Amino acid sequence: MSTRTEAATLSRILRWGLLIAVVGQVLWSFRPAPSRAQTVQERTGQRLYEASCSTCHGLTGDGTGNGPTLQGVSPSAVEFMLTTGRMPLASPNEQPRRQDPRFSPEEIDAIVAYVQTIAPGGVPIPPVDPAAGSLSEGAAVFLDNCAGCHGAGATGDSIGGGRIAPSLDQPTAQEIAEAVRIGPGTMPVFNPRSLSEQELNSLVRYLLWLREDGGDGGLQLGRVGAVAEGLVAGVIGLGLLIVAIRLTGSKT
Amino acid sequence: MVVRRFVEGVDERLDPGSFVAKNLRKVFPDHWSFMLGEIALYSFVLLVLTGIFLSFFFVASPQETVYSGPYAPMQGRIVSAAYDSVLRLSFEVRAGLVMRQTHHWAALVFMAALIAHLIRVFFTGAFRKPRETSWILGVTLFAVGIAAGFTGYSLPDDLLSGTGLRIIYSAVLSIPFVGTWLAYLFFGGEFPAPELLSRLYVLHILLIPLALMALLGGHLSLVWLQTHTQFRAPGRSEDTVEGTPVWPKFALKSIGLAFLTFAVLAGLGGLVQINPVWLYGPFVPYTASSPAQPDFYAGWLEGLLRLWPDWEFHVFGHTIGELFLPAVVVPGVIFTVLALWPFLEARVAGDRVWHDFAQHPREAPVRSGIGAAGLAFFTVLMLAGSNDVLAKFLDVEVDTLNDVLKVALVVVPAIAGIATWWVCRDLRGSDAHPIGRPRRATIRRGAGGGYEEDEG
Amino acid sequence: MRRPERIVAAAFALSILAALGLAAVYVAGGQTQAEGALLLVALGGIGVGLLVWAKTLMPGIGDETQPRPRRARGPEPTAAADAVIGGAEELGRRALLTRLLIGAAVALGLAALFPIRSLGRAPRGSLFTTPWRAGMRLVTVDGTPVTRLTLEVGAFTTVFPEGYVGSADGQAVLINVGDAPLTLPPDRLAGAPDGLVCYSKICTHAGCPVGLYLAAEHQLRCPCHQSTFDVLNGAEPVYGPAPKPLPQLPIEIGDDGNLRATGDFTAPVGPSFWDLPPA
C-alpha cells in the first residue's frame, strides 16, 4: 500500500472515531438515571425532580457546580424548601426566600419520596402537635433560642451578610418544625436532644398563637420596638401638635 | 356671680397690690414656633399625673415570684415582683394599660418637643445675652430628660431594658481609674445586682422629677422675668414686646393647647401599642433579643456605639476599654459644647450686646450652617442606631449599610452645613421663602443682537 | 350662632359625651382602645373648643405692646445687688471667723459624702473570676447536664456551671462545629474536643449576651451592636466594635460522656475595664 492510501485510511478512521466518540458522549449524557423509583408516586416525583431540580442538584442527587449534594439531606429539608417556595431557585446565585410554592402538595410529596430513593436517610419529617404544647414553655424556648435572630415579636431582623432571619407569621406548624430540626441556610440546628419534641410542640404553639395576639395595646407597629415608636411619636404625636400650633399661632 | 365674689374675696384678703394684675396683663408673643416648649411642658404635666397613678401599682422589688395572671405565655414563669406588677397593671388593672402607654408616649413626645424647642431656640439665636442661663437650664433639662426616660423604661425589669442597663454598666466600667468603683457604687455591685431596681425607682419618681421641676421652674421664671424674644417686624422695637395678654386670651390658648396635647398623648396611649414588655419576657442576664434599641432620644448614642471602630488602648499596664470614647467622652463633649454655646458664639462673633430680637435663621448664616451640620450628624447617628431595622426595611445588607453610614457621618453634615450657610447668605436681607417660587423674568432679544431683561 | 361658636359648642358637647362614654367603658370592664379613643375626644374636645374660642371669639383682645424690663445702662449694680454685696462684705470683715466657717462647711460637706460609699461594694477581684472551676459539669438552663451527644453538628446551646444556672458571668455558649477546622493555639485546642467548642457568651464590647449563631459561617453575632466573632478561629472579632475575642472555656469529655470544664475561662469575661492588664 502506498503512503497516501495509508494516510487516507488513517485519517478516515480518526474522523469516524472522533465522530463516534463525540456522539457517544452526547448520547451518554442523556442516559436515563439509574432509577430506583418503584411506585407511581416515586415515578411522578422523578419526573418533576429531573425537570426542576436536577440541573443544579444532579440527576443522582450528588450535586453539580451549581448546587450542593442532596446526600444526607433529610426529607424534612426537602419538604421545607419546597413548601416554603425557597426551592426551586431560578438561578444558583439567588438568595432563597419565602415565596408561593411552585408545586402542589401532592407533587411535593412525590418529589420528597423520590429524593429519598436517590439520597436516603437524614432527619425524618418531625411530627408536631401544637395542641400538646404549652404557651408558657413555648415563650421561654422562643426567647432563649430564637428571639436573638427572629426578633422578640417574631417579625424578623437582619443578621448580617445580607441575610434576614425571616418573620415567623407565615410558616405552617410543619414548616416551623422542619426548619428547627434541619437548620436551613445559616440557621443553626436544634436537634431533639437539645430541643425536645415537647419543647418543639410548645414553641410551635406559641408562634401560632403570637400571630393572632401580640397584646391589647393597640396598633403593633410591626413589633419592631423603639424605632417605630420613636417615629410615631415624632411624626404623629409631635406632628399633629405642630399642625395645631401652626393653625393657632401667628406667623410673624 | 360666684366667680366675681370669689375673686373679690381673695383680693380683699391678700392685697396683692398690682403684682397679680400686672402679671395677668403681661403680654407674650404668639408666634407658632414659640409654642414648642409648651408642648414639652404639658407632656411633662401628663407624665406626672399618669406617673402618680402608676406608682400606686408598681412594685420596685427584684424579689422572685411566679406569674399567675391572665397573660398565658408568662404563666408559671419565675419573674421579679417588678415585672409581675407591670403585667398586672397591663392586663388586670382597669385602665392600667392606657395609663402605662400614655405615660410612655408622653415621655417620647416630651423629648421630641424638647428637642424641637431646642432647635428653634438655637436657630433663632434666642440664647444670646441675657438668656444664657435659660439655655444652660434647658440643656440640663435635655440631659436629665434622657435619664428620666432611661430609668423609667428600665423599671419593668424586662429583657430589652435590662440589656440596656448592662450596656450602661459596661460604659461606666470603661472609665479610667475610677470606672470599676463607680460602676459597683451606682449599680450596687457586679451586674446584675438586686439593689439596682429600687435605686432606679428612687431616681425615677423622686430625684429626677424634683430636678426637672426645679430646672423647669428656673427656666420658666427666667422667661417670665426677662420677657420672651420676638422676631423683627415693621413697627417693632427691641425695647418693647408685642403680643397677647396672659389673661384671658393667652391663658385660654395655652390651656387649650394643653388639653390638645393630653388628647394626642392619651389617644396614642390607647390606640398604639408601646413597649410590650410581655413579649420581651423578664430580664435574665444570659439572653438578648433583637432588634435591640433604646428609646429614640438615646438613638444617637446607640448609633455611636454601633459605628465606632474597635479601638482599645493600653497605658502603663492598664486598659482603656473601647466603650470609653463613644459612650462617655463623645457625649460629654457634645453636651458641654451645647451648654456653653452662647458663650462660645459670643466670643467668636465678638457679640456681647443685649439682644431681645429673635433672628431668622438666614440672619446668622454661620450659626445656621453649624446647626444644620449638627442636625445632620445626629440624624445619621439615629439611622445608625436603628441600622438592623433599617436594613431589613430597605432590603439591603446591614454591614454595607454601616460602611455607608460611617462615610455619611462625615460627608452629610459637611454638605448640609455648607449648603445651609450658602442659602442663608443668599437669602439674607430678603423676605423670600427659601423654597419659594422662582423669580420670573422676561428676556427680550434686542435689535442689536443682545439680550435684555424686560422690566415689569 | 355663628360658625365658630357652633364649632366650640360642638367640641364641648362631644367632650361631655366622650367623658360619659369613658365612665361607661370603665364600668363595663375597660377596653384599652376604647379608652384611648374616648380620651382623645374628651380631652381634644375641650382643647379644640378653647383654642377656637380664644382665637376667633375674642376679637376685642388684640395685640398689645409693652415695654421690656430694662435696667439703667451703666456698670453700677442695682440696689438688690448692693444689698447682697454689702451683707457679704460685713461677714468678710471678720476674716478668721469667715475662714473657719468655710472650713467647717467644707469639712462637713466632705464627711457627708462618705455614706455614699455604703451604696456599693468593693470590686476586689470579682471581675476576674467566674463560678467555673475544673471538674464542674456543663448544664443547660433547665439544669440538665450536657453530654457529647446533646448537640448535633451545627447546633448550639447556652450552658452554665452546674449549681450556677443563670449565672450572669458564668454564661457560655457551646457549639458543635463537627469536622470544620478549628484554629486555636495548641494548648487550647485540647479544650475543644470532638468539634465541641465553648466560649463565654458575654460580648467583649458592651456585655450583651451573644445569642445569634450563624451556622453556615460558624460565626457568633451580638444583637446589640453587631459584633461578630469567628467560632473556628478562637472567637476573634471579625466585624463590629468588639475589640477582643470571646474567652474560651476549655472542656473535656468525661468517661460518663458528660462535658466538664477543665478550668475557668482563658481570660476575664466581658468588656474591658481599667484594671485589666493587656492580653
Image (cartoon, coloured by chain):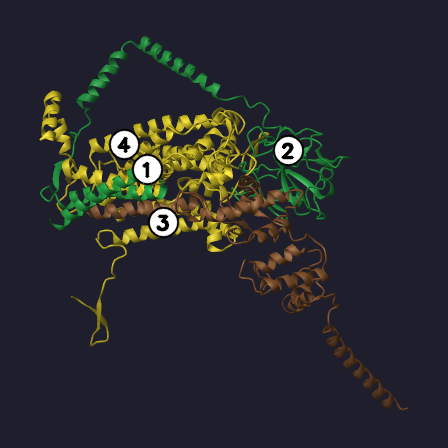
Chain colours: A brown, B yellow, C green
The reply to whether the C-beta atoms of the residues labelled 3 and 1 are less than 8 Å apart is no
Q: Amino acid at mark 2?
A: Gly
Q: Are marks 3 and 4 in contact (CB under 8 Å)?
A: no
Residue at which label 4 appears: B219
Estimate the spatial distance between the alpha carbons at disc 2 and disc 1, rounded to whole Å: 46 Å
Chain ID at mark 1: C
Label 2 residue SS: loop
* Residue B189 rendering spot, x and y as whole percentages: 52, 25
Mark 1 Cα-neighbour bin, 10 Å: few <14, some 14–19, many ≥20: some
**Residue B36: numbered disc:** none
| Image coords of residue B401 (percent x, y) | 49, 52
User: Is B221 positioned to the left or the right of A80 in the image?
Assistant: left
Q: Chain ID for label 3?
A: B
Whole-angstrom CA distance, mark 4 to mark 2, is 56 Å
Q: Which residue is mark 3?
A: B417
Q: Earlier in the sequence, mark 3 or mark 4?
A: 4
The disc labelled 4 sits on which kind of residue?
Answer: His
| Residue mark closest to the camera, 3 vs 1 | 1
Q: Estimate the spatial distance between the alpha carbons at disc 3 and disc 2, rounded to whole Å.
A: 58 Å
Calculate the distance from the C-alpha at mark 1 to the C-alpha at mark 4: 39 Å
Task: Judge the density around disc 2: few (<14), some (14-19), many (≥20) Cα neighbours within 10 Å.
Answer: some
Dot placed on the residue nearer the N-terminal end, 2 or 1? 1
| Label at residue C26 | 1
Under mark 3, the amino acid is Gly
